[in-house]
Amino acid sequence: MPSSQAMTHVAWNCDGKKLAAVGIDKITRVWTPEKSMEMRAASNFSGGHSDDVDYVSWNPTHPDLFCTSSQKDRRIVFWDARQSRYIQQCPVKISPVQTSYSPDGRSLLFASAGHQLFFMTLGKEGEETKEQWHVSDKDAIGSTAIFNHVGDGVILTHHSEHTLRVMDYPSLAIRESPAAHVGGCVALALDPRGRYLASGGYDSIVNMFDLNDWICARTITACENSISALSFSHDGEYLAIANAGPYIDICATETGVPLHRVPALAPSPTVTWHPSKYVIAYCGQTKIREGGPPPVAVISMFGLL
């Protein structure tokens, strides 16, 4: 896709039949990869944002529900893929950079460009007849964050702190703060089996923490660049690592051994495994070269669909 901007985020829905991508404009594009990944085959969702969309998250309990966020228009918008118009538009006071649902799909955390963490919950307030999303009054300091598999805890990182923080939810009391990275931690992923937490930092290292005692079980040093994103395969056997270089590394979870380097057309800000197959999706934008073709926004898949 010829574009002066990059695709900034891709995400699979919970049953793996849909892949959403955002970043180049105000539109969210959703494909059914088993049928086609051509541009004209995408379902376009627009009208919710007044500026570029940069992040998309799918509800883990429903294959058609997702939310998008934009740093420029300061909105989080909730959608149902079965209808073209959004369900709810939530203006927020900050620029949301990242969103992540709780396992039950009824809470949402979002991190701001100013490295603060906020929460939304789904419910009825006052005389409302149907459930709506509401911003809660809880907040914390953090650059990226995810819920644990049960939904009673939050793990968060800060781009200028060397430790992770593990907090109870909704009290936000700190439970653990293991040291993780020199120069700041920027990426997190939880093993679906619940054994490991992977963290990635500016130091190009990926740490695997044992969730029983929060001790670093192994360190992966396959990458030569700062880490952008991490994702475990559906069975927890493999870890995909996106970084500032034009490739994605795939490593074995139990040994940390690098298994394959997937060449990419451009550095990817994100990588995500399919929820039930050995397929990764990633995205980005090619660089401008003097006398070369114009930059293009890229969505790529690698594996067996």
Image: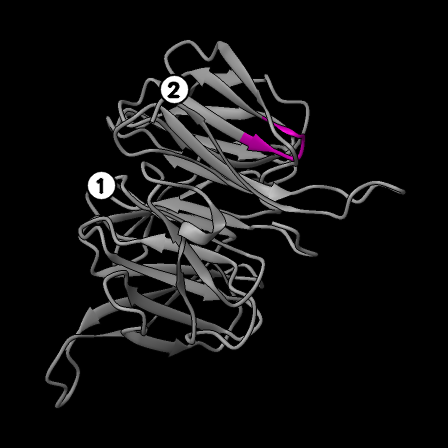
Q: Are marks 2 and 1 in contact (CB under 8 Å)?
A: no
Could you tell me residue 263's position as x and y percent? Answer: 61, 23
Q: Can you tell which of label 2 and label 1 is closer to the viewer?
A: 1
The magenta span reads 242-247
* In this picture, residue 274 sits left or right of residue 179: left
Q: Quadrant of the C terminus?
A: top left
User: Residue at coordinates 42% horizontally, 23% vertically from top-left?
Assistant: 239
* In this picture, residue 210 sits left or right of residue 107: right
The residue labelled by disc 1 is 15
Which of the two discs, 2 and 1, labels the residue nearer the N terminus?
1
The residue labelled by disc 2 is 238
Say whether residue 246 is magenta.
Answer: yes
Answer above or below: position of 268 versus 264.
below
Q: Is residue 11 visible?
A: yes
Q: Is residue 100 visible?
A: no
Query: Tag 1, which secondary structure?
Result: loop
CA distance separating discs 2 and 1: 19 Å
Relative depth, front residue between 225 and 69 = 69
Query: Tag 2, which secondary structure?
Result: strand
Question: Which residue ends up furthest to the right in the rendered image?
Answer: 290
Neighbour class for label 1 at 10 Å: few (<14), some, many (≥20)?
Answer: some
User: Residue at coordinates 58% horizontally, 63% vertically from top-left?
Assistant: 114
As shown in the figure, which amino acid type bears the numbered disc 2?
Answer: Tyr
Could you tell me residue 257's position as x and y percent? Answer: 48, 9
Residue 24 occupies quadrant: bottom right
Could you tell me residue 39's position as x and y percent? Answer: 49, 50
